[in-house]
Image (cartoon, coloured by chain):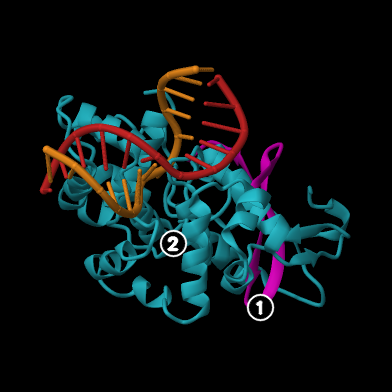
Chain colours: A cyan, B orange, C red
Amino acid sequence: MRIDAARSKEFTLDVDYVNGPLNVEDTILSAQTSEPEWIRYGQSFVDVEKISGTYVKYSIAQRGTSDQFTISVRYLTGPNGEISQTKLKQHLANVLGLRDDLSLFYEMFSADKPLSLTFGPLRGLRLMRGTSLYESLICSILSQNNSAIRWNSIARLLMKHYGRKVRFSDGSSWFLFPRPKDIAELNVRELQLKTSMGYRAKSVVTVSRMIHNNELELEPLVNVSYEEALEVLLQLYGVGPKVADCFLLYGAGQLKAAPVDVWMYRIVNRLYFKGRKSSRPAIASFLRDRFGYWAGYVQLYLFHYARSGL
DNA sequence: TCCCAGGATCAAG
DNA sequence: CTTGATCATGGG
């Protein structure tokens, strides 16, 4: 629900929170698997997050261009909670990748012909970061062999049926993403009937049970090397190279991860291998070797470029 | 009806 | 180490 203007607070995000150009709309609507897509109301986007122990419902809107803009934020908190604007600003800077040095990125690869073609139309597109490793892993699993629209609607059904409901001071409410415990106790068939997630339910339940039973810890995957983290993830049922890379990139913040899906497979083969068909793992490896720290960003740009029809 | 969607798994070659 | 069938499900 749209945030009630009379019962909420509003501020403008200081320019120095943003490092370079920014396009909020492209960023939020680019199907990144860190979390379900924020809800759109006109020019603003709404989401709920737990920040410093307080549930915060906020909307963000950008006016202007990718280079000259103002970012307005409106927010309110959950029951008996309070949040400082500084904390909220830092949170937004993190989830929207506002600290990433996009100007440096564009400059570094300005001579990389196929890639640099995307810099114009996608100027200001940023890499989002999830705030929940579990949520990011589940969203990544849901995305396999699925459309962005569908995995998002399935994630919303998960929240609606199994997530806790939080009420806000303006009378509105929001369903949180479920915890591992909430999903661990379900049987696969029930999950399929409630969410229509299909065969992915087996993986979702299995992973949730492992986490709930302390057989799997996601937190350590943030700080170990990319290779070590990948090895752990690939042992999980229903988690292959692409899902693992999605989680590592959008969830764990391992920026050298470059998920290769059907779109990436097509666009990289076309742009970099002149149509010769290379395997998906080979393409992912190629992107990591060639772009290093920026491989995840390169993937984001090429994916969005390919998906928006050239 | 067939094909596709931010694929993974398993068996067979 | 590669290829092909299969896996649920909804939309085009």
The residues tagged by marks 2 and 1 sit, at their Cα atoms, a distance apart of 20 Å
Check contact, mark 2 vs mark 1: CB within 8 A.
no
What is the residue that sits farthest to the bottom in this orientation?
A214
Left or right? Give the position of A60 relative to A305. Answer: right
Left or right? Give the position of A236 relative to A143. Answer: left
Q: Which residue is mark 1?
A: A53
Above-or-below relation of A93 to A66: below
Q: Residue at x 17, y 46 (%)?
A: A286
Q: Quadrant of the C terminus of chain A?
A: top left
Nearer to us of marks 2 and 1 is 2
Left or right? Give the position of A27 relative to A109. Answer: right
Left or right? Give the position of A232 relative to A86. Answer: left
User: How far across and how far down the image is residue A130, in percent?
Assistant: 50, 61
User: Closest to the observer: A192 or A171?
Assistant: A192
Task: Tell me if residue A279 can be seen.
Answer: yes
Q: Chain of mark 1?
A: A
Mark 1 Cα shell of 10 Å, populated few (<14), some (14-19), many (≥20): few
| 2 or 1: tag closer to the N-terminus | 1
User: How far across and how far down the image is residue A252, in percent?
Assistant: 40, 65
Q: Residue at x 35, y 72 (%)?
A: A221
Question: In this picture, which residue range is highlighted in magenta?
Answer: A39-67
